Image (cartoon, grey):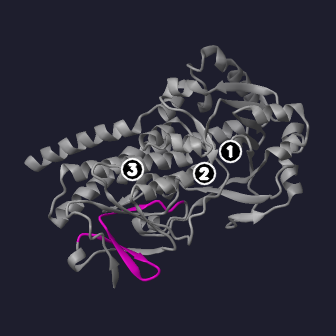
């Protein structure tokens, strides 16, 4: 058996193996390495190379607070991240503005952090560089095929078995391996594939030059605005915003899923893609014509898991709580997961881990259940909130749509401080989603947990 072990690790220190080098896994690695003292971290990624690809992504205030705590805010801005100035909802037929939510400096005043938009590849690139600089070992072409309990000198450890025959020994294993997580199957003891949501997405980016070539005043105005533009319509919607200092632009088209069951992606036709938005705002249709590929992505998720942990193994991000992308919170929740897990593991390491392997494993198992308890309710609310957003975005023309539009138009009168039947405009919902300090809450929760464990030990 070819077993690799962190020989430079102190006997009392924790070694964390993170499966998956996506945004959540890398955030966890950075937070673990920047703890005091640092945790030993190995990230294993099945891909032969970590490609920083994709399209646009949001870093809302709750995630921005976390990346700022990791010292990465300036680097993200240097990589093309910018402060979103507004969120504009438009009528699908003519592009008329239903309401424009002011963001910009208001995000920091209201929620304690900025709202950024960035290219996903640039975001992941910053995290990857930071993880390596912080001292995380990152292994590529390293596919995990099993997790077993260590034996002999590694008794009490978790053995992460790789496809190439090597094994890694860990105190804690983190499944950050996404929607099709293999670690999830090990935690649950059974296959648990995601299910279809009924929606699919066309995604793409294009250049400033493409848009300028139309010589259209309305398009020029959209290009210069640092806003997220959303056209709402029956059964579908479109999202548009700038990237990379307005040299590129992001477009996402969300429509009803027409792919066969079990087909995750498929190359559609440009004519079919455009036909989904026939009769919509002519400006949107002009923008859609910039897309040169009509690749369809089926949107998948699953109901909340009963358990995220098994002994000293846990899940984070899409492996445990995938969500529809309608609140900009999928990656944000994964970043919260990773940072909180690092806080808890670091605090336990500093509190003192037992030298007795059985008791040490019990400590870790109990701590990971605390992690699950902290995250489960919050992510359930987020998943449900995204489904609610889908409903309000996709209303057919009629009485409910008229009520929605009237209520949205009234929101500026309350300075965005009042209630709204649509969570996008509800002050309390937005405060709980964007303004809640998950890191401070994790610190408090660990202290309470630690005191409770001390009392139990003295009974």
Q: Secondary structure at mark 2?
A: helix
Image quadrant where residue 310 sits: bottom left
Give the label on residue 244, or none. Answer: 1
320 shown above or below 413: below
Task: Please rate how many residues cluster around mark 1, counting C-alpha atoms within 10 Å: few if below 14, some from 14 to 19, many from 20.
Answer: some
Mark count: 3
Q: Nearer the viewer, residue 340 or 321?
A: 340
Q: Is residue 305 visible?
A: no
Q: Secondary structure at mark 1?
A: loop
Give the label on residue 122, or none. Answer: 2
Label 2, label 3: how far apart the Cα atoms are: 19 Å
The magenta stretch is: 156-178
Q: Are marks 3 and 1 in contact (CB under 8 Å)?
A: no
- Lateral position of residue 189 relative to residue 264, left or right: left
Q: Residue at x 73, y 35 (%)?
A: 229
Sequence-wise first label, 3 or 1? 3
Magenta-span inclusion, residue 221: no
Q: Secondary structure at mark 3?
A: helix
Label 3, label 1: how far apart the Cα atoms are: 26 Å
Sequence-wise first label, 2 or 1? 2
Q: Residue at x 23, y 56 (%)?
A: 363
- Lateral position of residue 448 relative to residue 130, left or right: left
Task: Please rate how many residues cluster around mark 2, counting C-alpha atoms within 10 Å: few if below 14, some from 14 to 19, many from 20.
Answer: many
Q: Are marks 2 and 1 in contact (CB under 8 Å)?
A: yes
Sequence-wise first label, 2 or 3? 3
Give the label on residue 115, or none. Answer: none
Task: Please rate how many residues cluster around mark 3, counting C-alpha atoms within 10 Å: few if below 14, some from 14 to 19, many from 20.
Answer: many
Q: Which residue is mark 3?
A: 31
Q: Magenta region's main secondary structure?
A: strand
Q: Residue at x 46, y 39 (%)?
A: 68
Q: Is residue 14 visible?
A: yes
């Amino acid at each position: 058996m070819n077993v690799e072990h962190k020989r430079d690790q102190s006997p009392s220190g924790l070694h964390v193996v993170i499966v998956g080098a996506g945004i959540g896994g890398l955030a966890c690695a950075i937070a673990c390495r920047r703890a005091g003292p640092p945790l030993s971290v190995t990230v294993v990624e099945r891909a032969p190379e970590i490609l920083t690809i994709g399209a646009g992504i949001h870093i809302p205030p709750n995630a921005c607070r976390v990346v700022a705590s990791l010292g990465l805010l300036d680097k993200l801005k240097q990589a093309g991240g910018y402060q979103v100035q507004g969120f504009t909802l438009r009528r699908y037929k003519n592009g008329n503005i239903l309401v424009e939510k002011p963001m910009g400096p208001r995000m920091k005043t209201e929620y304690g952090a900025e709202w950024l938009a960035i290219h996903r590849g640039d975001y992941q690139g910053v995290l990857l560089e930071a993880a390596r600089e912080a001292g995380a070992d990152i292994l590529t072409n390293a596919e995990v095929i099993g997790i077993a309990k260590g034996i002999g000198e590694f008794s009490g450890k978790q053995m992460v078995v790789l496809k190439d025959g090597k094994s890694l020994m860990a105190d804690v294993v983190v499944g950050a391996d996404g929607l099709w997580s293999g670690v999830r199957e090990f935690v649950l003891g059974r296959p648990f594939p995601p299910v279809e949501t009924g929606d699919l997405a066309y995604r793409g980016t294009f250049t400033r030059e493409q848009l300028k070539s139309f010589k259209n005043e309305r398009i020029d105005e959209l290009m210069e605005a640092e806003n997220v533009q959303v056209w709402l319509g029956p059964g579908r919607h479109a999202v548009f915003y700038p990237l990379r200092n307005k040299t590129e632009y992001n477009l996402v088209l969300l429509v009803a899923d027409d792919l066969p069951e079990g087909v995750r992606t498929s190359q559609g036709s440009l004519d079919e893609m455009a036909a989904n938005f026939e009769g919509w705002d002519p400006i949107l249709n002009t923008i859609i014509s910039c897309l040169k590929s009509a690749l369809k992505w089926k949107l998948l998720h699953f109901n909340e898991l009963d358990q995220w942990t098994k002994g000293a193994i846990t899940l984070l991000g899409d492996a445990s709580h995938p969500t529809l992308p309608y609140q900009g919170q999928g990656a944000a929740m994964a970043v919260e997961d990773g940072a909180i897990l690092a806080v808890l593991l670091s605090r336990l390491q500093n509190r003192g881990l037992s030298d007795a392997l059985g008791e040490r494993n019990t400590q870790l198992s109990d701590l990971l259940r605390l992690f699950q308890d902290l995250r489960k309710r919050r992510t359930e609310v987020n998943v449900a909130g995204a489904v609610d957003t889908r409903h309000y975005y996709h209303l057919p023309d009629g009485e409910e749509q008229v009520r929605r539009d009237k209520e949205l138009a009234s929101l500026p009168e309350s300075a965005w401080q009042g209630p709204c039947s649509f969570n996008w405009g509800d002050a309390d919902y937005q405060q709980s989603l964007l303004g809640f300090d998950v890191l401070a809450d994790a610190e408090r929760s660990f202290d309470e947990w630690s005191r409770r464990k001390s009392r139990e030990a003295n009974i």
